[in-house]
Image (tube, helix red, strand yellow):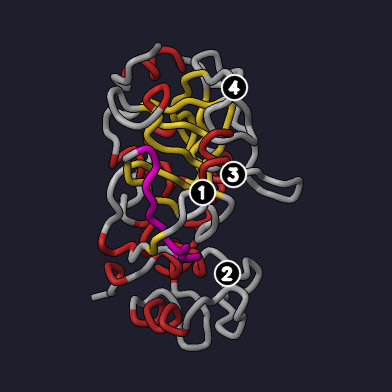
Amino acid sequence: MAKIDVMEPQDWAFLARYDEDSDKLNFNDATQLETPLSRDRIVNAGLADGAGFLTKMGLAYAKKVLAREKELQVGIPSETRTKINSKAILIQPPMKQWYVASHKGKKLVTNGEILYFGKPLSAMKAQKLDVQRLKHTIAECHKGEFVQIFPHTYQIEELGGTEAVWLSDAKQGLFIAVQAKLFDFLADRFKAGRFFGMGATLVVQVRVRNLGLKNDVAAFIMPLMPGPKSKLKEPQKREGWSEALHDTGVPIN
């Protein structure tokens, strides 16, 4: 029986990189094959032979994966995606050093990409940080007129690459991209949290009533800033967005 269930995400990503003229995988391409274990799992699953030629089953799977990749690069409604494990931020590379500090009597945790008020997880192995290094950043993240934003579209650059959640205001006039693993971590940690943004390149706030600092700000996320060569593109406006928004059950105010 083919061992499909042992396949890892990076294996499927590599499978989608097959040469469409020869139906062959290049097991010698170190830029695509992250680990020799992927080759072993693909061969053991009966998807390719030792030379990289796809089997009939392997080709069928590769075409499905490639079609799914193209769909996700365009983007799908955020509410239809399979959410990332909320602890992915702790185990997915690139790993970031975590720090813990105290500010106005509250503990805060940061890795430079997110900052939240609360205790660090033991797996973070957080190091102590002088809060003086963060005071200016915290103050700047409170400035300006923020509007509530909601998860709108899920998009990827490529399989195994950056995964993004695009957040939008109720009128779909503002779109902000954040890493999906950061969004999922904070959405899971602050289940009553509401997200607020001000601009595509500016910090996103997570607000929780009676928690956090000014305006109930309990966390910040740094946005993704896709460059001209990035495959991440601002999503199209969605028909029925208002209905989808109200179905989330998130307070709109």
Q: Give the alpha-carbon distance from disc 3 to disc 1, as whole Å.
A: 26 Å
- At 57% from the left and 45% from the top, the residue drawn is 73
Name the residue tied to disc 4. Answer: 144
- Which mark is on residue 18? 2
Q: In this orientation, which residue lies closer to the viewer: 214 or 44?
A: 214
Q: Which residue is mark 3?
A: 224
Local secondary structure at mark 1:
helix
Amino acid carrying mark 2 in the image: Tyr
Q: Which residue is mark 1?
A: 132
Mark 3 or mark 1: whose residue is earlier in sequence: 1
Mark sitting earlier along the chain (4/2): 2
* Residue found 36% across the figure and 57% down from its top: 88
Quadrant location, the N terminus: bottom left
**Residue displayed at 32% across by 22% down:** 248
- Residue mark closest to the camera, 4 vs 2: 4
Q: Is residue 70 left or right of residue 80?
A: right
Q: Residues within 10 Å of mark 2 (few under 14, many from 20)?
A: many
Q: CA separation, marks 2 and 1?
A: 51 Å
Secondary element type, mark 2: loop
In this rendering, the answer to whether 139 lies above or below 12 is above
The magenta segment is 93-104
Give the mark nearer the N terminus: 3 vs 2: 2
Q: Is residue 36 left or right of residue 31?
A: left
Residue type of the residue flagged with mark 4: Gly
Marks 4/2: CA–CA distance: 48 Å
Of the two numbered discs 3 and 2 in the rendering, the one whose residue sits closer to the viewer: 3
Q: Residues within 10 Å of mark 1 (few under 14, many from 20)?
A: few
Residue 81 visible to the viewer: yes
